[in-house]
Image (cartoon, helix red, strand yellow):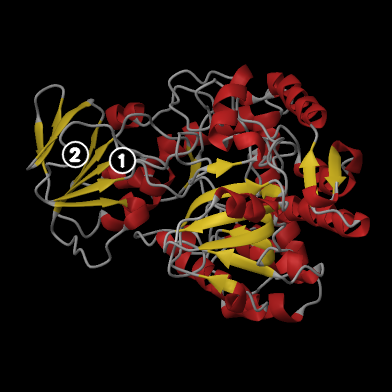
């Protein structure tokens, strides 16, 4: 029976009750942390929606050889859930995956989650002050508030190289590794020398027959202060009061000095130049061949793109079965990789270490989001540049909060980001409950003032003071902006708990206005 216009109008007049108070999109560490903190703050009516069939985000999807955390593990954990069981100072990926699962079970997140379900669209219902989320299984779910915890390093980026689909052998992106592929004795080509490649290359080099590494831009590689943690140390961390907190503080301080302070106050602090000297010394000590060493030497300032830490990556290029190729790639052939000089490099396996979509369309967000008056979030950012108030809220998108929004992350541990952003959200939700509001929206004036403030500060950042030409850094978007927050971590923590509530408008559902 067809729906009449009067029935449609009647339906449109209905103010709907949401299925859940909060919908958390993403079951990685951001989503897990947000869920736990919301629950601890009294907001227990939430649902986590995760595309994968398991928790952990990057640590669920990335299983390539050598995968591991690139900051000390003691800083890579929640302040409210510090563990002592790491096997190394820099934990391997399977331990991070286990940590995520541990948090999910300890804090009862699993029961309030929906796995193997992708979000394909989100639309704000202005009359009911709720979000309707369309799911990959054809269903929908509604929530008063949405916390977007999808991250940005989630969608693998396929290289724009002719013939990449014509390769006759096995092709794998590092973020979608096939553990059933046996690399022993094989001729392997790997395209890219970013953070993932730095971990994979030294791990697989001893077992493959021939490894050809195709480098577009050399990466700054610094020594890694890593070591195994014997049982005696782990026991001490468990038994000695305050030891885990002390280890976390020391690790966070190290991370703060090596990136946030060095990147955001370039030229004001000696850390950047000292880091470059250390990088050059590490390269000189690690690589014997001066020609290879020259090819591995970055010509851009440290910090312009994501640096890496490894004690084995550079030394791998001393091996007889490893070749560093810096000629540009002409095309992929069925049998391997052809460079512009006409050389064909044979390969049985092609590994794409080509990173992720970051500021590209279809990734921020990874699904269409429609706010008030039909405003699309991707379109808003295309027209107005990437921006979000404290990296959390965007005008015209009420009741939606971002964990990794533009100008939210300052380069410290992601766990600092997760906790500070969630503190910001909790403060808003508590105020909304206090005022009996159903709609929370940042004002255009507050958002504009914050955006202007971060842009004023960028003159101190390495991205705009240093020599970043030729860095090919994913930090830069199409507008030449770097949407990292130019702030020390302590400032981000303070702001999360003290931002002016007047920067938001709190109101009741449309039917009651």
Residue drawn at the location 75% of the way across and 35% of the way down:
487
Drawn side of residue 259 relative to residue 171, left or right: right
In-front residue for pair 257/48: 48
Q: Position of residue 44 (x, y in %)?
A: 74, 72
User: Spatial distance from mark 1 to mark 2, Cα to Cα?
Assistant: 9 Å
Label 2 Cα crowd, 10 Å radius (few <14 / some 14-19 / many 20+): some
Q: Which comes sooner in the sequence, label 1 or label 2?
A: 1
| Quarter of the rendering occupied by the N terminus | bottom left
Which image quadrant is residue 33 in? bottom right
Drawn side of residue 158 relative to residue 240, left or right: left
In-front residue for pair 153/79: 153
Residue drawn at the location 53% of the way across and 24% of the way down:
301
Residue drawn at the location 52% of the way across and 40% of the way down:
364
- Residue beneath label 1, please? 158
Evaluate if marks 1 and 2 touch, with contact meaning CB atoms under 8 Å apart: yes
Label of residue 164 in the image: 2
């Amino acid at each position: 029976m067809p729906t009449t216009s009067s029935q449609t109008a009647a339906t449109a007049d209905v103010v709907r009750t949401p299925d859940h108070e909060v919908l958390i999109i993403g079951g990685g560490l951001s989503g897990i942390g947000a869920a736990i903190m919301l629950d601890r703050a009294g907001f227990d009516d939430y649902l986590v929606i995760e595309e994968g069939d398991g928790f952990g985000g990057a640590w669920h999807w990335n299983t390539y050889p050598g995968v591991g955390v690139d900051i000390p593990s003691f800083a890579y954990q929640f302040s409210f859930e510090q563990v002592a069981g790491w096997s190394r100072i820099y934990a391997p990926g399977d331990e991070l995956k286990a940590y995520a699962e541990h948090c999910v079970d300890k804090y009862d997140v699993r029961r309030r989650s929906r796995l193997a379900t992708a979000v394909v669209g989100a639309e704000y219902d202005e009359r009911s002050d709720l979000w309707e989320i369309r799911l990959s299984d054809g269903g929908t779910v509604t929530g008063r508030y949405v916390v977007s915890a999808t991250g940005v390093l989630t969608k693998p980026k396929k290289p724009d190289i002719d013939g990449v689909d014509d390769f006759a052998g096995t092709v794998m992106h590092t973020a979608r590794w096939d553990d059933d592929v046996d690399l022993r004795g094989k001729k392997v080509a790997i395209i890219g020398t970013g953070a993932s490649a730095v971990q994979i290359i030294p791990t697989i080099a001893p077992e493959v027959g021939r490894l050809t590494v195709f480098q577009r831009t050399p990466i700054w590689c610094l020594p890694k202060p890593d070591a195994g943690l014997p049982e005696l140390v782990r026991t001490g961390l468990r038994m000695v009061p305050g030891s885990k907190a002390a280890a976390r503080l020391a690790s966070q301080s190290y991370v703060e000095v090596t990136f946030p302070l060095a990147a955001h106050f370039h030229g004001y602090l000696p850390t950047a130049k000292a880091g470059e000297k250390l990088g050059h010394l590490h390269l000189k000590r690690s690589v014997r061949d001066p020609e290879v060493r020259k090819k591995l030497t970055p010509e851009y300032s440290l910090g312009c793109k994501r640096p890496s830490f490894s004690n084995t990556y550079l030394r791998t290029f001393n091996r007889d079965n490893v070749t560093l190729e810096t000629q540009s790639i002409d095309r992929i052939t069925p049998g391997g990789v052809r460079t512009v000089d006409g050389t064909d490099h044979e390969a049985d396996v092609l590994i794409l270490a080509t990173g992720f979509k970051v500021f590209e369309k279809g990734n921020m967000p990874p699904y269409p989001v429609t706010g008030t008056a039909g405003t699309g979030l991707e379109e808003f950012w295309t027209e107005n540049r990437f921006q979000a108030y404290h990296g959390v809220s965007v005008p015209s998108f009420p009741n939606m909060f971002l964990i990794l929004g533009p100008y939210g992350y300052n380069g410290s541990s992601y766990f600092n980001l997760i906790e500070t952003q969630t503190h910001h959200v909790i403060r808003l939700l508590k105020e909304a409950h206090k005022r009996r509001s159903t709609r929370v929206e940042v004002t255009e004036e507050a958002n504009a003032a914050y955006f202007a403030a971060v842009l004023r500060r960028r003159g101190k950042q390495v991205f705009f003071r240093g020599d970043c030409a030729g860095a090919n850094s994913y930090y830069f978007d199409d507008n030449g902006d770097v949407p990292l927050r130019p702030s020390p971590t302590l400032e981000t923590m303070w702001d999360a708990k003290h931002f002016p509530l007047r920067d938001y408008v709190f109101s009741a559902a449309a039917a009651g206005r």
